């Protein structure tokens, strides 16, 4: 399944521009991250301040702004798809001619992505042979151009040219990008990263974990329409990975007990828990206020941390739980025993020997489920594994 998160919303200079404010909101509700690129003339209808406030992102209209960022190229690289709504007769003509006279038309030339065009204009302008021929040109080039609706326009005129309802735009868009929204209405809770247990103000004991796998699951769940909370402990994510967490309720924690506190609050509200965090199994019994001198650092007395997963599974009310097991061998019997002991529905067993998994963008292992499924995961990306796990969770969620 394609991962589509970053959407460019191009806005042309028609009165329907105001309706795109609702479209933007609805796209955000469905987990898309939207950057608005209005044409300069569209600012007569809806100003940049409105788009910036609604999208929470910088809005520019010309290539002469933020030249240091080379925005038409950086936006093109970041985007997964483009919606142009409303598309005026002039904008359609400029795109058909391959013009590049504002940021949006530059961007259209610079991307090789699915583009949905949503025309809105006066019926005569829509039916004019010039517009019809331009629309045909765009369709021949692979753009999806929606048919405008028939109805009353700004004045008294009635005919084809009305901006479609937000619902039907989103439906067309998701058909264009072929994304499943199969977790819509579901609440997904993910833990990720490695907890750290302080020895003194400078030292800690902890588990190796970049937080990458859990973040990939959180991001995939958001793409598939879920409402997502991520309890994240000491991650080492790239800037791009951090950015993909936009739209997710991220709670940052340090220790196992802090993670537990938030789990207890969030778990009862969730439909699915994905426990990918590497939880430190024990913590120093006493945390020194001052830095311990190296000569005094001979041994550390430890207290066991609670098994967060096991404890939380005991208060479940129908939630599906995915557990992870990082082992130094792929022993299925160990995995099955752990699945049962933890009260989980699904367990991903990966072999972390030889340092191949931690910090990497790739993974390899076996998924086992409480209903007997066993799925081998050959060397694959953590993003792909995230979708595989969510597919299994969906089966169990019914
Ligand atoms: N886990 C947890 N609380 C802990 C330890 C682990 O919730 N104190 C969770 C992990 O997030 C993971 C699963 O339990 O989803 C399995 O973790 P793992 O470290 O493989 O198992 P342990 O229970 O720690 O068993 P052992 O270290 O003995 O193999």
Image (cartoon, helix red, strand yellow):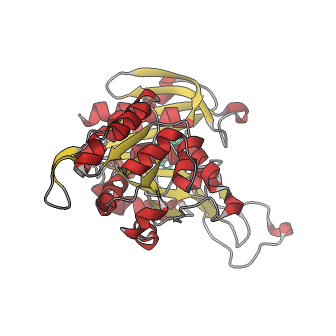
Q: Position of residue 177 (x, y in %)?
A: 40, 35
Q: Position of residue 7 (x, y in %)?
A: 46, 49
Question: Which residue is painted at 67% across and 57% down in the image?
Answer: 205
Q: Position of residue 347 (x, y in %)?
A: 44, 33
Question: Which residue is painted at 19% across and 56% down in the image?
Answer: 153
Pick the quarter of the image with the C terminus.
Answer: top left
Q: Position of residue 250 (x, y in %)?
A: 47, 61
Q: Answer whether residue 276 is visible to the viewer in this image.
A: no
Which quarter of the picture shows residue 327?
top right
Which residue is at the far right? 295
The reply, left or right, for residue 211 in relation to residue 319 is right
- Between residues 284 and 181, which one lies in front from this camera angle? 181
Question: Which residue is painted at 60% across and 66% down in the image?
Answer: 285
As displayed, is residue 265 above or below residue 227? Answer: below
Which quarter of the picture shows residue 379?
top right
As displayed, is residue 369 above or below residue 213? Answer: above
- Between residues 65 and 129, which one lies in front from this camera angle? 129
- Between residues 375 and 224, which one lies in front from this camera angle? 224
- Between residues 25 and 190, which one lies in front from this camera angle? 25
The reply, left or right, for residue 363 in relation to residue 272 is right
Total marks drawn?
0
Q: Answer whether residue 282 is visible to the viewer in this image.
A: yes
Which residue is at the far bottom? 289
As displayed, is residue 225 above or below residue 17? Answer: above
Question: Which residue is painted at 33% across and 34% down in the image?
Answer: 175
Pick the quarter of the image with the N terminus.
Answer: top left
């Amino acid at each position: 399944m394609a991962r589509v998160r970053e959407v460019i919303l191009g806005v042309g200079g028609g009165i329907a521009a105001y309706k795109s404010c609702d479209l933007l909101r609805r796209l955000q509700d469905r987990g898309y991250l939207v950057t608005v690129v209005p044409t300069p003339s569209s600012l007569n209808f809806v100003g940049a301040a409105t788009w910036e406030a609604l999208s929470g992102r910088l809005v520019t209209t010309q290539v002469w702004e933020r030249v240091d960022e080379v925005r038409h190229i950086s936006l093109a690289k970041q985007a997964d798809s483009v919606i142009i709504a409303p598309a005026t007769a002039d904008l359609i003509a400029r795109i058909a001619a391959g013009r590049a006279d504002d940021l949006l038309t530059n961007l259209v030339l610079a991307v090789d992505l699915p583009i949905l065009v949503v025309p809105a204009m006066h019926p005569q302008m829509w039916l004019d042979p010039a517009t019809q021929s331009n629309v045909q040109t765009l369709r021949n080039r692979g753009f999806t151009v929606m048919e405008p609706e028939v109805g009353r326009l700004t004045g008294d005129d009635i005919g084809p040219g009305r901006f479609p309802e937000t619902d039907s735009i989103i439906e067309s868009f998701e058909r264009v990008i072929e994304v499943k929204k199969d977790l819509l209405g579901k609440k997904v809770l993910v833990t990720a990263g490695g907890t750290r247990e302080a020895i003194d103000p400078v030292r800690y004991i902890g588990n190796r974990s970049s937080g990458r796998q859990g973040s990939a699951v959180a991001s995939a769940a958001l793409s598939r329409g879920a409402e997502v909370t991520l309890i994240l402990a000491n991650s080492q994510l790239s800037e791009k990975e951090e950015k993909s967490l936009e739209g997710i309720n991220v709670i940052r924690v340090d220790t196992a007990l802090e993670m537990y506190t938030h789990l207890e609050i969030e778990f009862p509200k969730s439909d699915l828990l994905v426990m990918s965090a590497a939880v430190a199994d024990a913590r120093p019994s006493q945390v020194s206020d001052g830095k311990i001198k190296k000569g005094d650092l001979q041994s550390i007395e430890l207290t066991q941390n609670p098994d967060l997963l096991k404890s939380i599974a005991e208060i479940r009310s129908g939630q599906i739980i995915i557990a992870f097991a990082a082992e130094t061998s792929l022993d299925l019997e160990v995995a099955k025993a752990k699945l049962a002991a933890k009260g989980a529905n699904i367990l991903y067993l990966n072999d972390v020997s030889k340092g191949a998994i931690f910090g990497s963008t790739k993974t390899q292992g076996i998924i086992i489920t409480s209903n007997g499924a066993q799925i081998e995961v050959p060397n694959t990306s953590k993003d792909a594994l995230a979708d595989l796990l969510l597919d299994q969770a969906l089966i169990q969620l019914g």
